[in-house]
Image: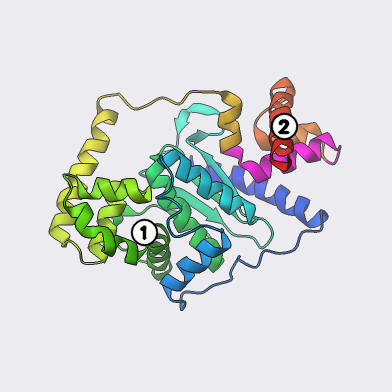
């Protein structure tokens, strides 16, 4: 499932790259614009500034959904394409397992791509998105699956984790508010709610900053994983649903959707090619295209 998903995304990326080059686009300076010798705190700040996000951007939002959407939109505004899906293509019988991978990144100077596994929780996807974003800055491809939230074996993965954690939960902010969080019944859930991350990521950040010890972290981690797996084992996992076209809009991302619809409507690619790249055809694609063009017009107004 992972391999087939990567191949599908590579096809979309290749098309998008060709489209952008033909359209006169310039290579993105952010792709490969940093290296592992950079101070991770300064790089986190640089990324935040490039995305035009304040240090408290997540704290000002109500839900994890709002935070994920805001971060995705900010990333796509600077030219990075974000795809997501919880299944292979449109096949709901082939779910993507977040225990196998949470996301991946395919770097390219014109069309860098981040893919998120939508089978994961929204709060976990936010960390994945931040982690893969650092990969873009380093100009290195990668598949992300942070096992037990322990430091990764590879140096590049450790660096990406450090930057992502600082980007989402700035050290100075957590240390300032630690006593406030520690005074609550569920401190890691409190921190998670503030910064729109998962409680485990919040606990891991507290461990990294030596606010708790390893015994406290692993006790919480094991409890959290047991609670997360229980509904799955009981067959109570949430089923996907909602509006098909809205779901496709999230899966295909804003930049790719706008480009493929524009190319098809302007006659710059055949509709069969658009159908192949989007997984939709006929009236389904036309209805989706109308919705995409309406969104583009509304945003311009």
Tell me whether circle 2 and circle 1 mark residues in contact (CB < 8 Å): no
The answer to which of 248 and 3 lies nearer the viewer is 248
> From where the camera sits, is residue 142 visible?
no
Q: Secondary structure at mark 2?
A: helix
Q: How is the image coloured?
A: rainbow
Q: Which quadrant: the C terminus? A: top right
Residue 29 among magenta residues: no
In percent of the image, x 54 and y 64: which residue is there?
A: 49
Image position, residue 101 (x, y; %): 41, 47
Query: Residue 67 in the image: x percent, y percent?
Result: 46, 45
- The residues tagged by marks 2 and 1 sit, at their Cα atoms, a distance apart of 36 Å
- Residue range highlighted in magenta: 251-268
On residue 102, the disc is none
Quadrant in which residue 260 is drawn: top right
What residue does disc 2 label?
294
Q: Main secondary structure of the magenta part?
A: helix
> Could you tell me which residue is drawn at 73 percent across and 28 percent down?
290
- Is 69 drawn above or below residue 21 in the view shown? above
Left or right of 215: which side holds 109?
right
Q: Residue furthest right?
A: 267
The location of residue 299, given as percent across then percent down, is 69, 40
Q: State the residue position of label 1.
A: 169
Q: Is residue 258 magenta?
A: yes
Judge from the rendering whether residue 108 lies leftward or rightward of residue 69; answer left or right: right
**Could you tell me if residue 18 is visible in this image?**
yes
Q: Secondary structure at mark 1?
A: loop
């Amino acid at each position: 499932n992972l391999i087939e998903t990567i191949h599908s995304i590579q096809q979309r990326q290749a098309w998008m790259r060709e489209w952008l080059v033909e359209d006169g686009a310039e290579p993105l300076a952010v792709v490969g614009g940093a290296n592992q010798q950079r101070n991770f705190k300064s790089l986190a700040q640089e990324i935040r500034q490039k995305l035009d996000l304040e240090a408290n951007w997540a704290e000002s939002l109500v839900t994890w959904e709002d935070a994920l959407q805001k971060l995705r939109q900010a990333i796509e505004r600077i030219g990075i394409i974000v795809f997501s899906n919880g299944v292979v293509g449109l096949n709901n019988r082939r779910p993507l397992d977040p225990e196998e991978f949470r996301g991946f990144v395919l770097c390219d100077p014109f069309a860098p791509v981040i893919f998120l596994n939508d089978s994961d929780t929204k709060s976990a996807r936010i960390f994945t998105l931040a982690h893969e974003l650092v990969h873009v800055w380093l100009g290195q491809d990668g598949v992300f699956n942070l096992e037990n939230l322990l430091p990764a074996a590879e140096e590049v993965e450790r660096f990406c984790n450090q930057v992502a954690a600082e980007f989402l939960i700035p050290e100075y902010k957590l240390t300032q508010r630690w006593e406030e969080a520690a005074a609550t019944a569920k401190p890691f859930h409190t921190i998670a709610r503030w910064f729109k991350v998962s409680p485990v990521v919040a606990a891991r950040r507290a461990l990294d900053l030596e606010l708790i010890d390893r015994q406290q972290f692993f006790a919480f981690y094991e409890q959290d994983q047991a609670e997360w797996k229980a509904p799955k084992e009981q067959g109570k996992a949430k089923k996907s649903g909602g509006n098909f076209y809205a779901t496709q809009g999230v899966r295909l991302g804003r930049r790719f959707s706008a480009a493929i619809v524009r190319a098809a409507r302007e006659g710059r690619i055949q509709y069969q090619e658009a159908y192949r790249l989007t997984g939709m055809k006929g009236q389904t694609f036309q209805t989706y295209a109308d919705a995409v063009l309406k969104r583009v017009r509304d945003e311009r107004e």
